[in-house]
Amino acid sequence: MSTAVLLMAHGTPSSMDEMPEYLTRVRGGRPPSDELIGEMRRNYGAIGGRSPLTDITLRQRNALRDSLGGGVKVMVGMRNWHPLIGDVLGALAGSDVTDVVGIPLAPQFSTLSVKKYVEEAMSAMPPGIGFECVTSYYDHPLLLQAFAEKIREAGMPSAGEAVVFTAHALPERVIAQGDPYLEQVRATARGVAHRAGIATFDLAFQSAGRTPEPWIGPDLGDMIRTRAAAGVRRLMVAPIGFVCDHTEILFDIDVQARELAAECGVELRRPASLNTSPTFIALLAELAKRVVARDRSSVVSLP
């Protein structure tokens, strides 16, 4: 009898050829247009042809396994690409695993991300295996410390340099329905700023979906234009809603946002992502141990 840990993430295709199937999964079974496929292939091409999300997540798994000790089984399951959450959990049937601790690799809870990971896991859990999942860790001291460390490693903002924290945008209707994501992102931004000793900052949102409905803002591109119009010539963009490098970081910020900033006469820089930061791995280990010890202050128990 043993407890396993499941790290859950979005997933990414391993090759350009897989893009149509991947986008169909992301879109809930709706086939993507040729235009969308072409756009995403160009975006991936701009960062070397593939996203490192899966590779980094597997390295995070290995680091967490080392931290917890060899006796703890640590798995990775993706919602939208292989290794799929359902396949990983299905393979536990007949094993000695009696309980699974789920940890989403997304610090802030949202019904459009973490909730879907949980639902996917619950639907695939073999009979007789219990499941508990961390709901969020947006204000955990180790998360705030990990982000602050990356800012300090990049070099603290100089005089006249503005700081913008970013996270993935969500449709406004989701927030209006009571999703806690926006308030949790704001709390993360305040906590990281305090830990890093940053007195003033802006918060912007990025990577909004291609739908006609309004998404929460301000959009990162609009923020860059606004700060440039105010005379800012140096800008640090620090993502606090993502825990590893992937297209939303490497393309949306490092390519797209940086090109826009240059057009506006602004030099944009970004702290490194958490990836396998020892502090971040220590956070994952603490979350896992807390659930195993039955401290349910940060978990949701599901039937």
Image: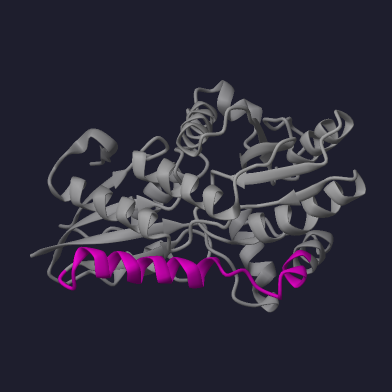
Residue at 27% across, 48% down: 287
Residue 274 in the magenta stretch? The answer is no
- The secondary structure that most of the magenta stretch takes on is helix
Residue 263 position within the rendered picture, expressed as x and y whole percent measured from the top left: 92, 49
The segment highlighted magenta reads 43-71
Residue at 25% across, 50% down: 286
Q: How many marks?
A: 0
Residue at 71% across, 36% down: 159
Residue 61 position within the rendered picture, expressed as x and y whole percent measured from the top left: 36, 67
Q: Is residue 303 above or below residue 258?
A: above
Quadrant where the image shows the N terminus? bottom left
* Residue 38: quadrant of the picture: bottom right
Is residue 135 visible in the rendered structure shown here? no
Its colouring scheme is one colour
- Of the pair 94 and 161, the residue shown nearer to us: 161
Residue at 57% across, 61% down: 245
* The furthest residue to the left: 1
Quadrant where the image shows the C terminus? top left
Residue 228 position within the rendered picture, expressed as x and y whole percent measured from the top left: 85, 36
Q: Is residue 19 above or below residue 17?
A: above
* Residue 164: quadrant of the picture: top right
Query: Relative to 23, is 193 on the left or the right?
Result: left
- Of the pair 90 and 274, the residue shown nearer to us: 274
Is residue 274 visible in the rendered structure shown here? yes
